[in-house]
Amino acid sequence: MPLSLNPEQQKKIDALIDWMVNGARPAANAVDIIEGICSRLLDAGVAVDRFGLFIWTLHPNLTGRRFIWKSGEGVDRVDAPMQLFSTEIYTDNPLPRVIETKQTIRRHLEDPDCPDDYIIVGELREQGFTDYLAQPLIYINGDAHVCTWSCAAPGGFSDSDLAILEKVRGPLARLTEAYMLRLDAANLLSTYVGRNSGVQILEGQVHRGDGNEIEAVILFADLKNFTQLSNSVFGDALVRLLNDTFDCLVPPVMNHGGEILKFMGDGFFAIFPTGDDLLPAAQVMAAMAAVTDGRHLLSEAEFDHKLGVRTAIHHGRFHYGNIGGGDRLDFTAIGPDVNLAARLLTAATELDHDDVLSETAAALLPGSCEQIGVVPLKGYEENQTVWRTRPGPA
């Protein structure tokens, strides 16, 4: 549909397209970009009262992200859970049809012959809207996402409104694709290497040796008697057991400011960074609280073969960054203090205690800990003292 606009409107639409093509700078995030697009369309005289953007993402717990802009109300963002695809709000609305056909769907809500074939049709009509448009946003690889436009003006969208929205669709698809590529990269990096590690990688820490020396409380954890259980539980059931167990143990670590750096079979390695505002003693207590919360969740969980947890906590300094060979790198923590924490976990087994601390960590909690043994640790010439927190009153 050719555009037929007055010179002033044409100038504003050209400026909008140029702004979008050039990356919508200096808009810093999706909300700013959506606000910018919609406000510029309104300023150009386009009868837009509601905008929806529905984008699918790579995330372990989410299907995608939905943005809804309403004139005078701003932008509302909702993260869509994995089960969205099975709900009526998705299946009985235009989104799956637009994605499948890659064709625009319009419903002129004022038209007496407008079909009530989607839930959104009745909802928007009740809210006073007069027109609805669902457009595919087609990525370079052919994947389709969806944006929707709604109008409350009598008569609905004009022919020039529809032509402008069609012209905006291509640049919007490119902006959305760029945003989603970065969002997916951030999600995947956070999922596989940890939140802070992912941020550093995105900021350019991608060369072998990149990283720095940091101080942190180190937490090693593993599951008791897992090896014995793995001889009787196999395949998917064993994976399910691990996932169910980690679902109880991992969120408390993150809730208390920790970061899971690595899963190691039936255990994991986490750090609680220390600094000016994060004192070592507070981070030792945060690690201990995470373990306590995880055990509580595990005790209340309803699944078979629940296992106990053994932990070791230490505070130290280590290299936090990239190691590896060729083009295969791992963003991790290495150093004697990391090794000591790992060895303490072995000592916990030998001493038959579930939660142990190094002498360094115990010293941060004066009067709260007691010595439970002096043991040789592999790789250390001198025996190491192992501690635990003093039991509370029975």
Image (cartoon, rainbow, N blue to C red):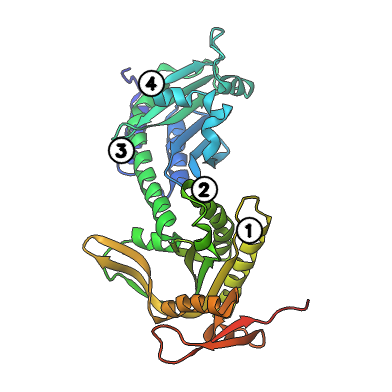
Residue 70, placed above or below residue 364 = above
Residue 335, placed above or below residue 263 = below
For the N terminus, the image quarter is: top left
Q: Which label is found at residue 103?
A: 4
> Could you give the CA–CA distance between mark 3 and mark 2, rounded to whole angstroms?
54 Å
> Which residue lies under the disc numbered 1?
298
- 329 or 320: nearer the eye? 329
Q: What element carries label 2?
A: helix
Name the spot of residue 291 as percent of width and height, x first.
60, 67
Identified by mark 3, the residue type is: Asp
- The disc, 3 or 2, on the residue closer to the chain's N-terminal end is 3
> Which residue lies under the disc numbered 3?
18
Q: Which label is found at residue 237?
A: 2
Identified by mark 4, the residue type is: Gln
> Could you give the CA–CA distance between mark 1 and mark 3, rounded to whole angstroms?
54 Å
Which marked residue is nearer to the observer: mark 3 or mark 2?
A: 2
Residue 276 visible: no
Local crowd at mark 3 within 10 Å, few (<14), some, or many (≥20)? few
